[in-house]
Every structure is written in structure tokens, then in C-alpha cells.
Image: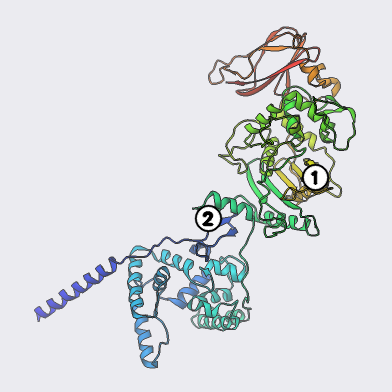
Amino acid sequence: MRIVIGVCLTVSLTAIILFQTWVTSTQLPPLTLDTSQTVVDHKGELLRAYTVSDGRWRLPVDLIDVDHHYLRYLIRFEDKRFYSHPGVDVLAIIRAAGQALLNGRIVSGASTLTMQVARLLEQGNSGRWEGKIRQLRVALALENVLTKTEILSLYLKLAPFGGNLEGVRAASLAYFGKEPKRLTPAQAALLVSLPQSPENRRPDRAAEIAFTIRNRVLNRLAKQGLLSTNEALAAMTEKIPNKRRPFPVIAPHLSDRKILENPLQSVTKTNVIKTLQKSLEQLAKETIANDKSGMSIALLVMDHQTGKLLASVGSADYFDQERQGFVDMTNAIRSPGSVLKPIIYGLAFDQGLVHPETLIDDRPTTYGNYSPQNFDKRFRGTLRVRESLQQSLNIPTVSLLQAIGPAQLIARITGAGVNPVLPGSQLPGLAIGLGGIGLTLNELVSLYAAIANGGSPLNKDKNNPLLSRATNTSLMSASAAWHIGDILSGVVEPIHSAKNQLAYKTGTSYGHRDGWALGFDGKHVVGVWTGRPDGASLPGMLGSSVAAPILFDAFSRLKTKLTPLPPPPLGTVLVDNANLPQPLKRFRGRNAVFGLPVNSPIITFPPDGTRVDLGYSGNMQQPLVLKVRNGRPPFTWIADGLPVLIAVHDRQTSFTPDGPGYLNLAVIDSDGLSQNIRIAVD
């Protein structure tokens, strides 16, 4: 007897060991799934999803993303002992076998959720006994390497729901138009019932069958106590969706760009505000609803305090082939028209050439073979610099650019992180101030964000998604940037737009090919482009009449009240023309400023472009020595657009800068002649 018992124990133990070895030696299919790439907004809400390589919708999803009622229904209906069995439910197998013997046919299955995951992972056939054995083995092996939560998570991604829908999230979006986080009992029951026979029960093709099977699930759940009778009856009256809904395509151009930048990332998060994005996409569509010219629209919204891109509309309609809606016009190189003028004026303020209250001439002027004209071919005579920018006059702008130097303008905007494109291999000329250059809406919004942010561009490495590279170079001084904002907030609003003192500038490129409007308040900057993607002319299209109303409408959708512009920085000169230093009362042009080489003042120290160590890194801070040769005293010294020394008769003097960094210095003598340099202070 003992021998028999010993033999039985030995055989049993050997069988157990062999069985365990059989299970543990199972070669499992890959457990890392290829899921749809998704782009989400700042809250994690879906903006756009892409199919996997074989064209299926298989969206990433975890248990936390799914309604807990659905999970309860699923386990109770499909595998009530899921959390207790080892992957195979022996009791269910015995029950199914007994029912089959009594009825002469298969009445119910014994497949657990783990076995279903095994089949879905291998895309195997469960109809033959070899397939069933393989499922049993893989299911047992899965339970050895995965937790129950991980197995259930795989089911939520792999379960078939008809057509190319895989996973509960894809099914919920396609059939209900919403995420599976909150489902009605009827919706949850339908999703529970579909994977058993997805093609025969899919509601978009077999609504009556889906209705019957769903109600059968609800009835069974009520009998098992998961629903009250009244809840089940109410759920049974809910209609079955009879068509598939399209997956969200929100911020499509931005999403495409993000996917190209992060091809291996499953979920790409953006700072886009979904409701704002949808509203601005609708604004673009509404604007071109009755248009027959082929015009398109691009829009950008940025928080210039943080650098977060809140909305990006690449075209009026992504799917409009006739308007080439697939082209992302936020990233298209176009002529900026007049929207670079505020930067030219800001640099002129920085270099001490003018003040907003300086008088400047708007009269016929020729520079070699170039004779700039105002848009309306008229001349205003003498007016304030403030007024010339508000009226977007071309001749004063070119006068200032000639004094600054086109190369200086290119260097400054390039240093701010953008990549201006010049026609052919030409050197920058005066025409760049009026649009003779190529820039993108992304870059222009970034430049205006820098102005709104006190002259400092946001660093690409930290928080500016519009820049193609990192930069820490200032576009202009804080005082110059404040003056620009103050001036632009006085521009007259478009007809029928809110009177809200938005700081904004419009522009129209040569031939009416591009209409622009860029504006900012104390927190946000918005850019608008209008035109045809193919660059064709749109006669009559002006930035002021087409793009500007869109800009104001976009701000009204962004917020109910503008954020006030900041107060002027410490040291900003706020005086009228009568109280300006004599050299700043009137701008005389390049000939006056740089006219006679013998008599013009020349800064002999510090030399232009040098780096001067004043001891800011230690405790031995020293003043900056200034030396000037030629010119007639008294002299006025200007640093970053602010007078720091006035009516100085000595040719050597000094002052203490506010701190380390780049410094624009200018000296002006009593005849209005001057020289400008740029140095770095350490």
C-alpha cells in the first residue's frame, strides 16, 4: 500500500513538475502592443489619433481611463472568477462540457479573459482543439508574468469591436463620440457584448442584432444584481448608434508636425486648449464660408509669459482640397509686408536715433535708385514717430532702417531665433523693412511675443515651440519694447470690432498676396495670416480689412477682457517733444547723423563689438568709461534707448550700467551728429 501511495505521489509530483515546465517554457507572443499615436491637449483630451501600421484603430488605454461600471459588467459577463483563477477556469470548463453533453451542442463557452487575450495576441484560431490547447498554455504562462491588471489592460486594447476598431477606447469614440471614461449602462452593455462576434453585431451594420444582444446583457446583469430592474428597463430604451463617428481631427497640422517630430512617442502632449482650438477652427471656416477666391487662413495663439502655444490653425479647412487645406500655413515662408516695422522702430529707440515723440519727415526721399512710397502714395510732412508707426508710413520707416542698417535688422531678428529668407543671394537692402524678406507666421508670432515679453525672446529649449533653435539674445530693450506696445495700443480698431486698446499691427505684402495682423495684450499674442497657399494675388485683400477683424474676433474668443499691458520699465523716458534732449527733438536722417566724417563724433572707447569686464561676477564692480573724439560738445550719451548722460562737455566720462549683458550705446553731439555701437558687459 505504501508503495502504491509512493508511486502515486511520485507520478503526481512528476506530472506537476512537467506541467509547470510545459507552462514556463511557453514562448509568449510580444506583449508590447503597437498602439495608435495620439496627440492630446493640455488636459490630456484627444485632439487627433492615427491608425497603426495595418490600418487599425488601437488607441492607448488603461483601466483608469474606462468607466468602472463597464469593467464590472465585463468581468461579471465574461469571466466572473477572473481575479481568482490562474488563467484557466476549471469550473467553467466542467460547466461548459456538461451543458454540451446534455444538449448535444455547445451552449456556453469557458474562455477566460486571459485566454481571450492569448488568442488576440497571437491572432490564433480557437475553433480547432490545437488552438484551444495553445490558448490554455499561453493563458497560464501570461498569468505567470503579468498581473491581473496588466492582463485586463491588454484586453481593453485588443478586444475587437467590428471593422478596424480594436480596444474599448476606439469603440467608444467611434460609436458614441466620446471617451469611455463615462458610459451609460446601455453603452457599457453594448461594448461588453460586441467582442464575442464583432462583425455580426457591429451596430453600424446590424443595429437590430446589436440592440437584441445588448438588451440580453442588460437583462442578465439585472438578474445578477448589478443593475436594478428599473435601471435595466430604462437602459433598454436607449437607442443603438447606427453609424460610426469620425475620430477627432483637431489641430491637424500641429498634430502632423508633432508626430513627425516624435515618431516613436505613443502619446504627444501639447499646451493646446481644445475648446479654444475648435472655436478658432470654426472662426476660420466661417470667415471663408462664402469666399470664392480660394483664400485660406492661419491662426496662432501663444501665452507670451510662458511660451505655451494655446492654439494653432494651419488652414481654413484641413480637408478642403481646392484651397490646399492640407498645407500648414503657419510654417509657410511668406512676405511679412509691414509687420516688421515695430521691430525697426524698436531698434531705432534702442540706438538713440529717435523717441516716440521725436519729429520725423514723411516726404519724397530717394536712396540711390530706391524711392520708397507710402501705400496710399501720399505724404504727411512732419509728424511724430509715434504717429508714423501707427499710420504704418513707409518713408519714415525706410529712413530709420537706413540709419540702423538693414544688416543690423537681419542680425537682430536672426539672433532672436528666426531664420529670415532673402531673395536669391542678395544682401539685405532697405526693401526688407517693407516686406522684401521671407518669414513664417510661427516666426512673426515669436518676434511679437518677444516684444510683448519686454524685448526678450522665449528660449526654444525651455518653452517656445515656434522657434527652430535656441536663443537668449534680446530683440530690443525693455523700454523700447514698452514704447512699441504703447504705440500699437493706440492704433484704431477695425470697423465693427471691440474698442479694447489691443496692441496690434497689420501688413499687406506686395501684390495683395498676404494679409497679416499680429497683436498682443499683457498675457497673450495672436497672429493671423490670410491669402492663397499658392501665392496668387487677391486684389483688394488688405491686412487691415481682412486679417485684423479676425484678430479681434480671435481675442474675443480667447478671453472676455484683455489683460492690461505692463507699466513702463524703470527709467523709461516719458516726456513730450519739447522736453526731449535737443538731438532727439527731430530725426534728420542718415546724412545728418552720419554726414561729415571729420566732424561726426567717434566713440574711441569702448570699441564697437567688444566685451568689457566691469566685475559683475565679483565684488569689484566698476563704472564703464566712455571716450569720444570729434563732434561738438555738449554730448548726450544714450544706453539701450535711455539718456544716461546729458549735456556732458568732457570727452571722457563714465556711467554704471544696470547689469551684465548686451548694451547699445550712442553718443550725440550738439549738432545732432552721432555714432552707435554695441558691446557686451560682464
Residue 76 coordinates in the image, percent (x, y):
46, 76
Residue 639 coordinates in the image, percent (x, y):
70, 20
Q: Which residue is mark 1?
A: 512
Which mark is first along the chain, 2 or 1? 2
The numbered disc on residue 181 is: none
Badge 1 local density, few (<14 within 10 Å), some, or many (20+)? many
Residue 454 versus residue 324 in the image, above or below = above
Q: Residue at x 18, y 72 (%)?
A: 14
Q: How is the image coloured?
A: rainbow
Q: Residue at x 63, y 51 (%)?
A: 272
Residue 345 versus residue 82 in the image, above or below = above
Residue 503 coordinates in the image, percent (x, y):
77, 39
Residue 451 coordinates in the image, percent (x, y):
70, 35
| Position of residue 178 in the picture relative to residue 147 (left or right) | right
| CA gap, disc 1 and disc 2 | 41 Å
* CB contact under 8 Å: marks 1 and 2: no
Q: In the depicted view, which residue is nearer to us: 448 or 239?
A: 448
Q: Name the quadrant containing residue 251.
A: bottom right
Badge 2 local density, few (<14 within 10 Å), some, or many (20+)? some
Q: Which residue is mark 2?
A: 267
| Position of residue 113 in the picture relative to residue 601 (left or right) | left
Let me know if residue 67 appears in the view. Answer: no
Amino acid type at circle 1 is His
Query: In the picture, which quadrant includes the C terminus?
Result: top right
Comparing labels 1 and 2, the label whose residue is closer to the camera: 1
